[in-house]
């Protein structure tokens, strides 16, 4: 989750389009020549939503409670096809609770990673130190 938070922040700074509307925009491409559609900031397994026994769910939050993304003029000029989000949430839950993992995790654009041993983690869960 920390890797995803770092990549999402870097994406927003690099492309001036907020956070991507789809986590897949962070994967693929050439790390030396990434672009806003294929930024090459995380590996494709993580972007697919499943890695190391956990299921990752990325949910973008759009400005003004919109249900669809908005592409900034700077991003449009760079041929971005993924509209920007003003925030996000990510959950990471064991694919097989008790077998592939036992802890549930949550993070958002604040960068704070939270956890819960018994149920899905939320903004109210204990933060990792």
Image: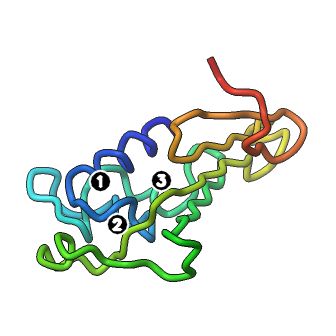
- Label 1 SS: helix
Which residue is pictured at 53% across the width and 65% down the height?
60
Q: CA distance from mark 3 to mark 1?
A: 16 Å
Tell me: 11 left or right of 2. left
- Label 3 SS: helix
Which residue is pictured at 87% across the width and 44% down the height?
119
Task: For marks 2 and 3, give the one nearer the viewer.
Answer: 2
Q: Which residue is mark 1?
A: 11
Q: Which residue is mark 2?
A: 25
**Within 10 angstroms of label 2, few (less than 14), some, or many (20 or more) residues?**
many
**Within 10 angstroms of label 1, few (less than 14), some, or many (20 or more) residues?**
many
Q: Does label 3 or label 1 sit earlier along the sequence? A: 1
Task: Tell me where residue 58 appears, x and y as whole percent.
Answer: 56, 60
Q: CA distance from mark 2 to mark 3?
A: 12 Å
Task: Tell me where residue 103 appears, x and y as whole percent.
Answer: 77, 35
Q: Which residue is mark 3?
A: 46
Q: Is label 1 in contact with label 2 (beta carbons under 8 Å)?
A: yes
Front residue (pair 119, 126): 126
Q: CA distance from mark 1 to mark 2?
A: 9 Å
Tell me: 41 left or right of 46. left
- Label 2 SS: helix
Tell me: 95 left or right of 20. right
Compared to 121, does 14 lie above or below? below
Task: For marks 3 and 1, give the one nearer the viewer.
Answer: 1
**Within 10 angstroms of label 3, few (less than 14), some, or many (20 or more) residues?**
many
Task: Tell me where residue 33 appears, x and y as whole percent.
Answer: 9, 58
Front residue (pair 47, 83): 83
Which residue is pictured at 73% across the width and 34% down the height?
115
Compared to 13, does 67 lie above or below? below
Compared to 84, does 51 lie above or below? above
């Amino acid at each position: 989750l920390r890797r995803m938070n770092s990549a999402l922040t870097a994406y927003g700074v690099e492309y001036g389009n907020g956070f991507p509307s789809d986590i897949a925009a962070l994967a693929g491409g050439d790390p030396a020549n990434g672009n806003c559609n294929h930024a090459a900031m995380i590996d494709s397994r993580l972007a697919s939503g499943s890695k190391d026994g956990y299921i990752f769910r990325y949910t973008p939050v759009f400005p003004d409670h919109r249900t669809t993304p908005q592409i900034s003029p700077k991003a449009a000029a760079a041929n971005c096809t993924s509209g920007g989000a003003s925030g996000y949430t990510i959950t990471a839950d064991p694919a097989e609770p008790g077998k592939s993992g036992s802890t549930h995790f949550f993070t958002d654009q604040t960068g704070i990673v939270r956890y819960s041993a018994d149920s899905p983690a939320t903004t109210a869960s204990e933060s990792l130190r």
